[in-house]
Image (spheres, rainbow, N blue to C red):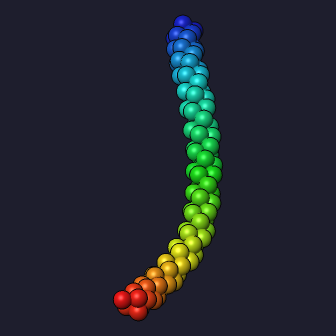
Amino acid sequence: RLTGQQQEINSLMQRKSAADEENARLKSEFSNLNRKFKDKSQELKDTEECAQKKEEQNRLVIKNLEEENKGLNICCADLLSDLEKLRKQEAQWKKEKSGNDTRIK
């Protein structure tokens, strides 16, 4: 009877030892997974911050380009106005020259 109990104790100790080893392996695996999770979480946070900075930069670039475009549109409108005035002046001068040429003849 004592030998049977001793065998049962030995068997239970072996099972406990195997369970402890499995527990240690699972803890190590969990620790590795947790570290990877933290690394990926930080990577995601960094990526999101970078994306936000890029979006803000893009917004500023777009705003600056829109302002520059407004300025260029105003400049173009002024140049077109000047061109129209010069064309009218040219037509007037041609008219005057034609009249002068006619009088000279």
Q: Position of residue 72 (x, y in %)?
A: 56, 69
Tell how many labels: 0
Q: Position of residue 87 (x, y in %)?
A: 45, 82
Q: Position of residue 55 (x, y in %)?
A: 58, 56
Q: Is residue 5 visible?
A: no
Question: Furthest residue to the top?
Answer: 3
Question: Furthest residue to the front?
Answer: 105
Residue 88, placed above or below residue 25: below
Q: Residue at x 59, y 40 (%)?
A: 43
Q: Which residue is at the front of the view, 103 or 21? A: 103
Q: Which residue is at the front of the view, 15 or 54? A: 54
Q: Report which quarter residue 104 is drawn in.
A: bottom left
Q: Is residue 101 visible?
A: yes
Q: Residue at x 55, y 22 (%)?
A: 25
Quadrant location of the N terminus? top right
Residue 76, placed above or below residue 11: below
Q: Left or right: 63 with respect to 100?
A: right
Quadrant location of the C terminus? bottom left
Q: Residue at x 59, y 52 (%)?
A: 54
